[in-house]
Image (cartoon, helix red, strand yellow):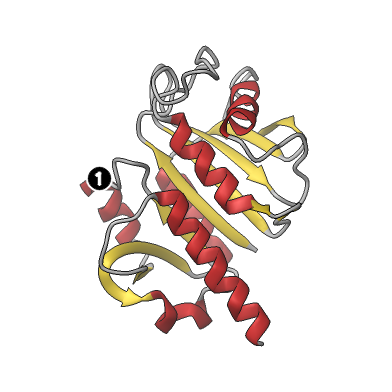
């Protein structure tokens, strides 16, 4: 299993955003939608061993987690409007601390980054956090199978979030010396893991 966590600092927590204006009315929801597509889609197929956790921190009710489960996901097409529509439908549910399924493979609940990190720590799986100029991903690829990967959105990860993540002793890895878009990072990580499986 691969888990990707994307922190959406401005991603709205109301279904009142427009699918025609995901960057504006959605609080850069377009970034999260691109990450969903990069994480889950293959050519003419879908990655069934991937979960995507979107942490929505925008108004009006910050602290909502939307999870996409590749193993049971339906009604998702490889475009931003499609994933945006599934997020919008999930936000129409009665959201509480107990997760509910909005459409097949899409779950929603209240929650924050610390809650996610605690849950991941309890699994005993390796957690990875990406930063430029750290250990190259290919030196750590053998540890990444069944990994959990934490990302910021277009704003990155703030100081408090980085401090919180660091408290869970993640492997800090790099895809290279340059800053990349989050969805591109996800594509590269999937590729590294695909290559690792083929090489076994």
Q: Residue at x 76, y 52 (%)?
A: 44
In this rendering, is residue 9 above or below 141? above
Task: Give the x, y percent position of residue 180.
Answer: 34, 55
Q: Residue furthest bottom?
A: 200
Residue 121 appears in the figure: no
In this rendering, position of residue 69 left or right of residue 9: right
Q: Quadrant of residue 93?
A: top right
State which quarter of the image contains the N terminus: bottom right
- Element at label 1: loop
Crowding near pointer 1: few (<14 within 10 Å), some, many (20+)? few
Of residues 74 and 126, the one drawn nearer to the viewer in this rendering: 74
Residue 92's spot in the image, x, y percent?
A: 62, 17
Q: Where is residue 12 drawn, in percent x and y?
A: 44, 23
Q: Position of residue 107 (x, y in %)?
A: 66, 36
**Can you name the residue that lies furthest to the left here?**
159
Residue lying at 59% horizontally and 80% vertically, measured from the top left: 196
Residue closer to the observer: 115 or 85: 85
What residue is drawn where x is 27% and y is 72%?
A: 134
Residue hosting label 1: 158
Against 69, residue 42 (above or below) is below
Please identify the quadrant where the C terminus is shown: bottom right
In this rendering, the answer to whether 112 lies above or below 2 is above
Q: Which residue, as the protein is rendered here, is positioned at the far top?
A: 16
Residue 39 visible? The answer is yes
Residue at the front extreme? 43
- Residue at the location (65% across, 22% down)? 89
- Number of callouts: 1
């Amino acid at each position: 299993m691969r888990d990707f966590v994307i922190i959406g600092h401005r991603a709205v927590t109301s279904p009142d955003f427009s699918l025609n204006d995901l960057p504006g009315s959605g609080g850069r929801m377009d970034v999260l939608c691109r990450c969903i597509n990069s994480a889950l889609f293959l050519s003419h197929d879908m990655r069934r061993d991937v979960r995507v956790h979107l942490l929505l921190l925008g108004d009006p009710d910050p602290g909502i987690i939307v999870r996409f489960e590749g193993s049971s996901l339906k009604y998702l097409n490889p475009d931003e409007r499609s994933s945006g529509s599934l997020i919008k439908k999930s936000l129409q549910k009665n959201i509480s601390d107990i997760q509910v399924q909005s459409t097949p493979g899409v779950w929603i609940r209240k929650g924050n980054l610390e809650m996610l990190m605690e849950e991941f720590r309890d699994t005993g799986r390796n957690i990875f956090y990406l930063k430029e100029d750290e250990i190259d991903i290919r030196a750590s690829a053998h540890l990444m199978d069944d990994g959990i990967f934490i990302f910021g959105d277009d704003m990155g990860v703030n100081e408090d979030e980085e401090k919180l993540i660091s408290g869970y002793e993640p492997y800090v890895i790099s895809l290279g010396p340059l800053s990349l878009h989050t969805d591109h990072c996800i594509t590269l990580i999937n590729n590294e893991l695909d290559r690792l499986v083929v090489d076994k």
